[in-house]
Amino acid sequence: MNREDVLRKLRALRNLSEGEGAFPAEVESAKALIRLLEERHGIQDCAPEAEPKLVPDWPYWNWILAEFGIEGRRFLKSASATLNPTTIIIIRLDSGEWQVQRKTRFGYQVIAQNHNPESLRAYLSQNAPRKYTFAQAAGH
């Protein structure tokens, strides 16, 4: 087994965790195997490679806003939308983070925030203003 194979196996073993669905015994076995491979092949403890984070692009965020009748506006690496006259949504397109801010006498207060579009959809399904009349809701 060459050095590249060992490094590849070490990266795979380091990614094994209970948070990813592994059992505690599997995690412990992986740690023991990591120590064994490092000792046998003379490899110093190297940090695992960070996996690239997939960040949704503007059309996807805009589509979620449009589902609730909200018009989004984009400027460079950020976007915003007005939820109601005192509440705005701010989206950072480079990191995928969003927050809802309410206007107060002293500025803006963050009332909700998260880092993925599905959590924004869940927030809007609970808090977005309804854009239909009673006649539309009754099916007439």
Image (cartoon, grey):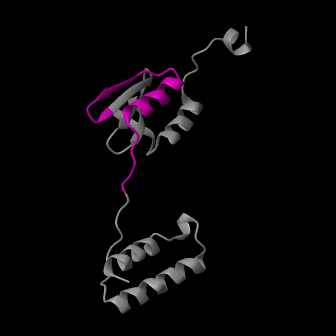
Range drawn in magenta:
52-78
Q: Is residue 106 visible?
A: no
The residue positioned 53% from the left and 82% from the top of the image is 28
Q: Where is residue 140 shown, x and y percent of the image? A: 73, 7
Q: Tell me if residue 79 comes above or below residue 92 in the rendering.
A: above
Judged left or right of residue 87, residue 95 is left
Residue occupying the far front of the picture: 1
Q: In front here: 126 or 74?
A: 74
Judged left or right of residue 76, residue 72 is right
Q: In front here: 20 or 107?
A: 20
Judged left or right of residue 68, residue 74 is left
Q: How many marks?
A: 0
Location of residue 60 by image quarter: top left
Q: Where is residue 73 shown, x and y percent of the image? A: 35, 24
The residue positioned 58% from the left and 70% from the top of the image is 22
- Residue 60 within the segment the image draws in magenta: yes
Q: Is residue 93 visible?
A: yes
Location of residue 71 by image quarter: top left
The residue positioned 40% from the left and 26% from the top of the image is 81
The residue positioned 33% from the left and 73% from the top of the image is 47
